[in-house]
Image: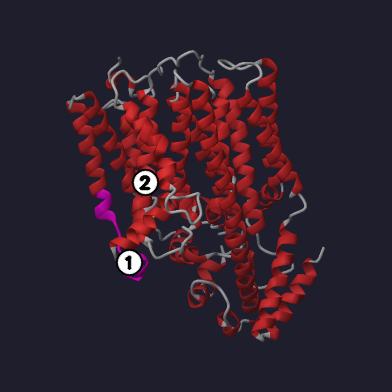
């Protein structure tokens, strides 16, 4: 059996899979294109239906940084200054770049950029899975990854322009896990992992958990091999030093203390809630989700295990996600109620993705009961995907639609203030969240008025838009077409594989047939929703706003939104 020093690097050829040939990268790249287009189109569609051109929640607090950037008075400390409990250097680099390229600070443009980042993350993860699993069945890797990056369960990250920070966290975490966890000490890959780990500290406060997970993998590998070599110990020490650096950079906000767990019971309840995603109100489900990972760990620890490299990647990915859940369970135990905040689910899903691929790997390695193992694996995956769809529907109806409704109210208040100049119009609740006084200071700042979106400026026959606004709007309006193109490409590739056969699979593979049917069902669903437009969504929401104001006895505000609804009437 190869030692880990020779099989732990992406720079080396992976071990040949049993009874299966490897895919060529050119073949896999076509599947990656289908994944990219599908994830991109889905994310853009969410942004187009439910995104707001108005700054939203935490983004208002970024005004001082944007002001420093546009006035040329910025310093490096502005990029790494604390934002709540985080240091969001990567997100601020993206923000500043978009403001410079676009000429204005427009959330809708940021959402478009974030959609590309999100789709890129999907492809990076798919590539890592494909590589570590032996560079075979790339179509199946993309098929299993696609729902996690196309369904709207993490809808907050699609409609918050500032929430690129979570995609950056995942990207740098993957690079850290691969570089430090699998790169040979001192190699280019290893140094890339070190750099990614340090940059990851400036994405989200929990960025320090990636090097911690990588160090844990190295220790596990040495325990399995019963060999504590010098290079491995140095790598562990480097991981711990980066973790300590992250702890030193950590920021504590007194106002966030109320969100934290104040007892062991609160913490464990929150952790069960987070680890049970995507199951709703089922705190016992972490036991079900983790089963394939437990079986994989047991098999990995046995001598002469056939796929140590694949098992290690899935285990370290799961460990990183669990550590994220632990951090969120402590820091946000009293935030989100019974349903974890949507923006965190991009981290929770990595635990589930690792479990799904662990189930598939175990089925592949089964020699005594291959058919039975395959059926169990796909039953497991089907249960997971069903609940991902359920949680996505809950997110749309329970989060995205209400958020867009609140933003329509806030947009109306800002427009009224810009038209009248009367501060009372902006301060009259319900209005801009989280703090209308903060919004007032931003809207009234002469330096910021040169870059604020058109909705934050006085009415004009020709609204001032950025240079990228038209392109961003075009991409979002055509999101269903982009999404459908990705699905059609996926369906064509599945059909071609069924017609011509695929390496290592029979020509009429039932697995590929299921994938083809799933693609057709997804395409049919997208087509059934083609009449849902931004205008139709806003028309329905404006009518709900009218009814809400009428019930509250605020007939003046009801009349304003009734007029807006009439303007949107199909």
Determine the CA span between mark 2 and mark 1: 24 Å
Judged from the image, the secondary structure of the residue bearing numbered disc 1 is loop
Whole-percent x and y of residue 281?
Answer: 49, 57
Indicate which disc residue 253 carries: 1
Quadrant in the picture for the C terminus: bottom right
Q: Residue 437, relative to residue 166: is it above or below?
A: below
Q: Foreground residue, 18 or 196?
A: 18
Residue visible at 61% across and 74% down? 414
Q: Quadrant of residue 510?
A: top right
Whole-percent x and y of residue 179?
Answer: 34, 32
Q: Which residues are magenta?
A: 245-260
Residue farthest along the right direction in this orientation: 570
- Residue 462 appearing in the image: no
Judged from the image, the secondary structure of the residue bearing numbered disc 2 is helix
Q: Foreground residue, 267 or 312?
A: 267
Indicate which disc residue 37 carries: none
Q: Quadrant of residue 295?
A: top left
Task: Name the main secondary structure of what is drawn in magenta.
Answer: helix
């Amino acid at each position: 059996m190869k030692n880990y020093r020779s099989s732990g690097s992406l720079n080396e050829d992976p071990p040949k899979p049993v009874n299966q040939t490897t895919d060529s990268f050119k073949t896999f790249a076509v599947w990656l294109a289908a994944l990219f287009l599908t994830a991109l189109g889905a994310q853009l569609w969410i942004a187009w239906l439910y995104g707001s051109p108005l700054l939203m929640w935490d983004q208002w607090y970024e005004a001082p940084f944007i002001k420093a950037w546009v006035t040329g008075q910025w310093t490096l400390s502005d990029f790494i200054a604390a934002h709540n409990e985080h240091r969001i250097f990567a997100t601020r680099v993206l923000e500043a770049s978009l403001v410079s390229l676009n000429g204005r600070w427009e959330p809708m443009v940021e959402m478009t950029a974030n959609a590309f980042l999100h789709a890129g993350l999907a492809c990076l993860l798919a590539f890592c899975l494909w590589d570590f699993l032996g560079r075979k069945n790339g179509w199946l890797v993309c098929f299993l990854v696609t729902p996690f990056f196309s369904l709207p369960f993490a809808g907050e990250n699609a409609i918050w322009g500032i929430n690129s920070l979570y995609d950056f966290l995942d990207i740098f975490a993957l690079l850290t896990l691969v570089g430090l966890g699998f790169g040979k000490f001192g190699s280019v890959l290893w140094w890339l992992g070190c750099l990614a780990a340090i940059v990851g500290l400036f994405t989200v406060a929990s960025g320090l958990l990636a090097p911690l997970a990588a160090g844990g993998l190295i220790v596990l590998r040495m325990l399995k091999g019963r060999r504590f070599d010098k290079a491995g110990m140095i790598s562990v020490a480097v991981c711990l030093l980066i973790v300590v650096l992250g702890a030193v950079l950590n920021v504590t906000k007194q106002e966030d203390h109320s969100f934290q767990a104040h007892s062991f019971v609160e913490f464990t309840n929150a952790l069960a809630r987070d680890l049970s995603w995507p199951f709703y109100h089922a705190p016992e489900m972490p036991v079900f989700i983790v089963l394939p990972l437990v079986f994989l760990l047991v098999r990995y620890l046995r001598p002469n295990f056939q796929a140590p490299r694949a098992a290690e990647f899935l285990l370290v990915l799961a460990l990183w996600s669990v550590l994220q859940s632990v951090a969120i369970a402590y820091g946000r135990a009293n935030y989100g109620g019974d349903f974890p905040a949507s923006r965190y689910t991009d981290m929770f899903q990595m635990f589930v993705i690792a479990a799904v691929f662990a189930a598939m790997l175990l089925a592949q390695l089964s020699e005594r009961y291959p058919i039975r193992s395959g059926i169990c694996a796909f039953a497991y995956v089907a249960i997971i995907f069903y609940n991902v769809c359920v949680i996505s529907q809950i997110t749309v109806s329970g989060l995205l639609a209400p958020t867009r409704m609140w933003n329509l109210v806030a947009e109306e208040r800002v427009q009224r203030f810009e038209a009248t100049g009367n501060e009372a119009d902006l301060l009259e609740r319900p209005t801009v969240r989280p703090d209308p006084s903060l919004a007032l200071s931003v809207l009234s700042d002469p330096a910021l008025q040169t870059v604020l979106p058109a909705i934050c400026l006085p009415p004009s026959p020709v609204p001032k838009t950025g240079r990228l606004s038209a392109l961003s709007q075009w991409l979002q309006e055509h999101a269903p077409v982009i999404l459908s193109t990705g699905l059609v490409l996926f369906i064509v590739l599945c059909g071609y594989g069924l017609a011509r056969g695929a390496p290592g699979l029979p020509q009429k593979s039932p697995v590929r047939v299921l994938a083809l049917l799933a693609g057709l069902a997804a395409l049919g669903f997208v087509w059934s929703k083609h009449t849902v437009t931004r205008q139709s969504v806003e028309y329905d929401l404006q009518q709900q706003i009218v009814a809400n104001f009428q019930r509250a006895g605020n007939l003046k505000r009801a009349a304003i939104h009734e007029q807006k609804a009439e303007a949107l009437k199909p």
